[in-house]
Amino acid sequence: MTRKPLVDDPDDSDLEVSGKKDWAAGLPGVLHAMGPSLRGMGAVRTARLLTSINQKDGFDCMSCAWPDPGHRHSAEFCENGAKAVAWEATPLTVSSDFWAEHSVQDLAAKSEYWLGQQGRLVEPVYKAPGEDHYRPVSWDEAFAIAAEALRGLDSPDQASFYTSGRASNEAAFVYQLFVRAYGTNNLPDCSNMCHESTGTAMGETLGVGKSTVTYDDIPQADLIIIMGQNPGTNHPRMLSALERAKRSGTSIVAINPLPEAGLIRFKNPQNPRGIIGRGTTMADQFCQIRLGGDGPLLQAVIKRVLEAEDAAPGTVLDHDFITEHTSGLEDLRRSVADLDEEQVLRATGLTSDEIDELTTRYLAADRVIVTWAMGLTQHTQAVATIKEIINLLLLRGHMGRPGAGASPIRGHSNVQGDRTMGIWEQMPDSFLDGLSREFGFEPPRRHGLDSVNSVRAMARGEVRFWMALGGNFVSAISDTAAAEAALRGTAMTVQVSTKLNRSHGVTGDAALILPTLGRTEIDRQASGDQFITVEDTVCAVHASRGKVEPVADTLLSEVAIISRLARATLGADHPVDWTAFEADYGTIRHHISRVVPGCEDYERKVESEDGFVLPHGPRDSRTFDTATGKAMFTANAFDPIELPPGRLLLQTVRSHDQFNTTIYSRNDRYRGIKSGRDVVFVHPDDLAERGLADGDQVDVFSEWPDQPDRVLRSLRAVAFPTARGCAAAYFPEANVLVPLDSTARGSNTPVSKAVVVRIEAAG
C-alpha cells in the first residue's frame, strides 16, 4: 500500500454545518473507525492491529485511559481508538528530503492537522543555532549535542523535562531517575494541565488522588452522576460500561453545559440493537449547567441532604461511617447553612425543581458514583468543586464499598502511571528516599517546576533547556503567544516524538527531534522482545506488547533514548546501570518493585494476563492518609462569576475526530461540523441578542483585569443549544484567549472552561 503525505494545508473554505446528533456510535461509528484504518494502514496491518488493541496479549490503546473489562470483546476498541492506531501505525514516513524542503518557520505556519499527516518520524534531526532548517544527524551525534548542552548549564535547575501521558511506566521511571540523577525536580507533565485539580482535592480529602472505584463497580451503582465530561468523544468505551449499568437498573444524571450525543443515546455497534435498533437512552436527567456553576450546584444538593437528615434524624446520613472514618462534618454544615438559593440558581442556570430532582435521585440511591473529567478540573475553583464531590459522597458513606465512589476519568493512556512512577515536581521525601537507597545517589529535594511555572521560568531566562518526552506542549498549554515566546527564548529544545506537531516548529536556538517507537511496534532489545506496562484510570496495571515491525530500523524506544542520553550526560562512572535498562526492561521493573509503593513483586504481577490493581486505602479498607487520618469534609467558598452586560462564558472543547492536540480529521460529526474548526458554538438567543445570526463571521475577545483583550478572529458562529450565556470553541485554537496567569486555585491548572468573552461581528 502506498500513501502520500498531505501537500496542501486545508482551510475552512469548505466548512459545512448540519444539525447536531442525538445519539452516538452505531453503524457510522464502525464505518468511521474502519475507513481511516484501511486507507492508512491497509487490510492486513489493520486486521493485525485492531484485533490486538486492548487484548490481554496485545497492546494498550494509546488514546484514553479507560479500563479494560475482565471479559474482552474481540473488537475491544472504539472509533477514536482505531483512529489513534491508524495515526501512529501508518507506514508513511517523513523522508530525509523533507527537512531541506521545509524550514522551521514553514513548519510553525502549518496546522496541527497538516503536520500530523506527513507520516512517522524515522531519523534524528538537529537545528543548529542561528539556522532555520533541521538536518538529519546520527543518534550518537544527537546524544552528544544534548548532553553537551545539559553539561554546559550553570545549574541543573536551568533544565526542565516534560512528560506526556503516552510514556510507559518503564520509560517514565527511567526518565525521572535520569532527571533526578542529573540534579533537578523540574518534571512538568500533562497532569499539570488536566487532572492536577483532582489530585490536589482528593489528596487533601482522601489521601489518594486516584479513582476509588473499579470497572466492576460501575454496573453495581444505583446512580452515576457524570459531570463535565463527554464520553462519546473522549473515552467512548465508557458508553458500553454505562449501557451495562443501565441494563442493571442504574440511573444516570449528566451535568454539562453542552448536550453531548453519547449521553443522550448510545447505539452499541457490538450488538444488533445498536446497529438496527434505537439503542439505549443514557441520561435519565440532564442538568444543563452554566459554566462555573458545578460547585454551587453541589453545595445546594448537600444543603438539601443535610436538611433531609435534620427533618428525619438518623435516617439519611451514614452516621457509622461518618463517626468512624471522617472529620469536619460541622465545618461543612456551617459552610452551606446560609447558602442563597437565588445565587445558586443564577450561578447554575438551573431551576430549584431540577436541583430537587437531582437530590431525590441521590437520596434514593444506596450506591452512588460521581465521575468527572476536565469540564470540572479546568476552572478557577476546580479544587473546591471536586472537594464538594467528596463531601457529597462521604455524607452517605459512598466510599470504600461496591458500586460507590469517586471516579475521575483520565484522558491520556498512561498519565496516571507516569505519576505513580515519579513524574511529578513534588514527589514526597519517602519516594526520594527510596531512590537514594536503591541507586546510591542523593536526589534533589527542593520541589521543581510544573508546566505553567516552567513557561514562566523560560520567559525569565531561568530555564535554558527544555526536553519533552512525547506530547505537544506548545499547543497543549494555555496562552499560546507566551508559551511560544518562552520556548523560543531557550538555548535548546529536545522533543521525543513519533510524528510532527506544532512544538517542532517552535524551538529554542538549537533543537533536536528524536524519533521513537510507537506502542503498536515490536520493541526488540539485546535480551529479546520487550513489553511495557501502563496504569489505567482505575489503578489497574497491565502489560502492553507491540505487534508489528517498526516502520524503520532507525527508531529507538523511549527507554533506549533516555538511557543513552543519561549515559552521555552523566558519564560511564555513574552508579546507575543505564545500559542494563535498555537491554532488558525487566531490570527496570526490578527497581520499580523496590522503590514504588504498591509495586512489590512487580515483574510477576504484570506477567499475569490480567496484571494487578494497585493498593488504594480509601477503596480497599476505608483508610485515609490525610492530615487527620480520616476522610475530610471541607468547607469551600465560591465566588460566583459575574458577567458584565453582553458577555458570555466560553469553554474550550475537543472535536470528535481529535485526541488532545492530535487532529485526526477536520470533522466533528456529533456536533454537525464538517471540514473546519474555526467555529464558536453559541445559543441562538445569545446570538440574536448581539444582533448576530447563525453562520455570521465573528471575532471572539477575552477580557481580563489589567490586561489587554485577547482575540481569536474570523470564526463562524454556529447556533447550538448550549447553556444560555455560554459558548464553546475548539482546543487548542482557543488557547490564545487564556492568559498564563489564569490558573486554578491550589493546583495551578490553566483555566480554559470559564473564559469571559464578548463576541462581535468580524472586523
Image (cartoon, helix red, strand yellow):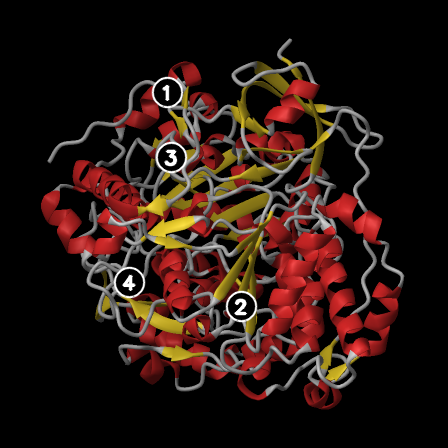
How far apart marks 4 and 3 lie (CA) works out to 25 Å
Q: Give the answer, above or below, for where 218 lies relative to 377.
A: below
State which tag comes first along the sequence, 3 or 1.
1
Check disc 2 and report the residue beneath it: 223
Horizontal side of 288 relative to 743 (left or right) equals left
Count neighbours of disc 4 (C-alpha within 10 A) and say few if under 14, some if 14 to 19, many if 20 or more.
Answer: many
State which tag comes first along the sequence, 4 or 3.
4
How far apart marks 3 and 2 lie (CA) works out to 29 Å
State which tag comes first along the sequence, 4 or 2.
4
Check disc 4 and report the residue beneath it: 54
Residue at (54% x, 83% y) in the render:
401
Asked if labels 3 and 4 touch by Cβ distance under 8 angstroms, the answer is no
Residue flagged by tag 2: what amino acid is it? Answer: Leu
Residue at (52% x, 42% y) in the render:
259
How far apart marks 3 and 1 lie (CA) works out to 21 Å
Mark 1: which secondary structure? loop
Dot in front, 3 or 2: 2
Q: Position of residue 460 (x, y in %)?
A: 73, 39
Residue flagged by tag 4: what amino acid is it? Answer: Asn
Mark 4: which secondary structure? loop
Mark 2: which secondary structure? strand
